[in-house]
Structures are given as structure tokens and as C-alpha cells.
Image (tube, rainbow, N blue to C red):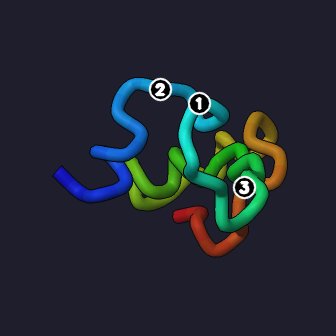
Amino acid sequence: MPRVQRAKKDRLLGETHLVLRHRPIAPHAALWLVVAAGSIDPSWEPYLPGAPAAATA
């Protein structure tokens, strides 16, 4: 088990000595879809605002 996982275990971050290196940000809405599917069907574009144009088939 990696050192960070051993240090955190099942505790909340505030209950440990660990700190985040960067402030978390929300992923782009369609990013998970592109990663899972490889491309986005153009007919879905109206329902996926912010979908990367390069991801369309």
C-alpha cells in the first residue's frame, strides 16, 4: 500500500497531517464520457454543453 494511503487510511483529510498540493477543481462535464467512449456522437452535442469539439466523431 502506498505511503499516502497508509497515512490517511479511512480518516478524513482534516483528521490527518496530510495537505492537498492543489485546490480541487470540477472536471469538464463531458470529460468522463470522452474517456469512456473515445468520441461523442454529434447528435449528443446539444445535451453536452462544453464537450470538447475534438472529441466529436
Q: Residues within 10 Å of mark 3 (few under 14, many from 20)?
A: some
Mark 3 or 2, closer to the camera: 2
Whether pointer 1 and pointer 3 mark residues with C-beta atoms closer than 8 Å, the reply is: no
Residue 40 percent coordinates (x, y): 55, 53
Location of residue 44 by image quarter = top right
Q: Residues within 10 Å of mark 2 (few under 14, many from 20)?
A: few
Residue 14 percent coordinates (x, y): 66, 34
Choose between 12 and 26: the one closer to the eye: 12
Q: Residues within 10 Å of mark 1 (few under 14, many from 20)?
A: few
Residue 48 percent coordinates (x, y): 74, 41
- Looking at the rendered structure, the secondary structure element under dot 1 is helix
In the image: residue 31, left or right of residue 38: right
Give amino acid for label 3: Ala
Mark 1 or 3, closer to the camera: 1
Which disc, if any, is residue 51? Answer: 3
Q: Which residue is mark 1?
A: 15
Give amino acid for label 1: Glu
Whether pointer 1 and pointer 2 mark residues with C-beta atoms closer than 8 Å, the reply is: yes
Taking the spot 55% from the left edge, 39% from the top edge, the residue there is: 16
Q: Which residue is mark 2?
A: 11
Taking the spot 51% from the left edge, 55% from the top edge, the residue there is: 34
Taking the spot 56% from the left edge, 28% from the top edge, the residue there is: 12
- Looking at the rendered structure, the secondary structure element under dot 3 is loop
